[in-house]
Image (cartoon, rainbow, N blue to C red):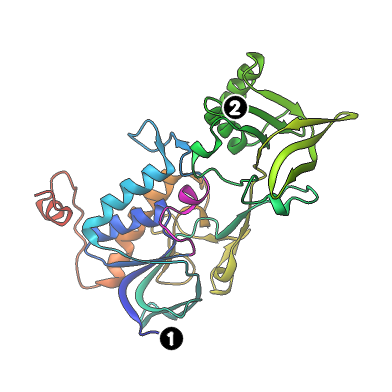
Amino acid sequence: MTQDIKTDVLIIGAGPVGLFAVFELGLLGLSAHLVDVLDRPGGQCAELYPEKPIYDIPGVPVISGDELTQNLMAQIKPFAPQFHFQQMVTGVSGDVKTGFHVTTDQGQSFHAKVVVIAAGGGSFQPKRPPIKGIEPYEGRSIHYSVRQREIFRDRDLLIVGGGDSALDWCLDLEPIAGRITLVHRRPKFRASPDSVAKMMALVEAGKMDFLIGQVRDLKGDNGQLSEASIAVVDEEITVACDALLPFFGLTMKLGPVSDWGLELEKNLITVDTAKFATSRAGVFAIGDINTYPGKLKLILSGFHEAALMSQAAKAIVHPDERVVFQYTTSSSKLQKKLGVI
């Protein structure tokens, strides 16, 4: 074990909500270290859809997951957060009076006055479609996420699924792909009606294909797909493709968090809505990993939660200091922290 790293706040998760928490904590003079199982910041935005457009960040009409991550990293730069990637937090001991001892699976340990869980849905992995012999193609011509749009330019794509991810990537990749075929097991979709309407318009215009059915078999050599067999009604047809993008959702696992003595509800951490505190004093949960009445799993909701959590964290780290609410637009003290004056 290495020597304990001391910090005011230890944040578990470096997705957008965890990153914004650094900003809110920094404005209040609190230092932060972040631990994440991924090899870079950004969470699901970086891992699953770095180039997928996001439309519901206030004041930003459209931004990709990667761009949002870069902007958040630039925003928190004045507070010099320290990152510890490719590590999973395995234990949290101690309490709010003595401080928390946090350990990772890589042997790193921290001593923090406050712990913030911003781990999204916990550890996650894409659901594998029930197709026999799929393994040799994974990572080469079967992709569970789109990290670089350009690798699909001029390729014949088979996209499978009926949710937002499947429909969004049909719409996003259609202008650059050679040909797109969408396969879904039924005519009804879980995606937004607007996306469905746009997809069907492309089908009617002959710009892409849509099949109601299920992928039964794959053919190709050395991990490179050449065609797929699709069961459609009472027949089986063959579709030429050199890449398959299955979007069957994610399997979420809470992981070690479930052993930390926190009150849970359906594998989510229950919190109050004043501080986003968990049932364990000094431990907070923000973002998709928490639950409370009226919870919306939106990035903007997580930003709000991070702001209120930070006020409560300040009272724990510096109980003798009065928290004076200030606006960044008018406070010269905060503007100096941000390096703008």
User: Which residues are the magenta region?
Assistant: 37-48
Q: Nearer the viewer, residue 205 or 22?
A: 205
| x and y, in percent, of residue 291 in the image | 53, 55
Q: Residue at the spot x=70%, y=50% of the render?
A: 222
Magenta span contains residue 184: no
Q: Nearer the viewer, mark 1 or mark 2?
A: 2
The span from disc 1 to disc 2 (Cα, nearest Å) is: 52 Å
Give the quadrant of residue 118: bottom left
Give the quadrant of residue 1: bottom left
Q: Nearer the viewer, residue 314 or 29?
A: 29
Q: Nearer the viewer, residue 242 or 315?
A: 242
Q: Is residue 219 above or below residue 107?
A: above
Q: How many marks?
A: 2
Q: Residue at the spot x=65%, y=45% of the render?
A: 142
Q: Is residue 255 above or below residue 250?
A: below
Instruction: Name the element at disc 2.
Output: loop
Q: Residue furthest front?
A: 221
The answer to which of marks 1 and 2 sits earlier in the sequence is 1
Q: Is residue 313 above or below residue 193?
A: below
Dot label at residue 1: 1
Instruction: Name the element at disc 1.
Output: loop
Residue 239 as seen in the image, left or right of residue 18? right
| x and y, in percent, of residue 184 in the image | 73, 33
In the rendered image, is residue 334 in sight?
yes
In the rendered image, is residue 291 in sight?
no
Where is mark 2, residue-wise?
Answer: 178
Give the quadrant of residue 85: bottom left
Q: Amino acid at mark 1?
A: Met
Question: Dot 2 surroundings within 10 Å: few (below 14), some, or many (20 or more)?
Answer: some
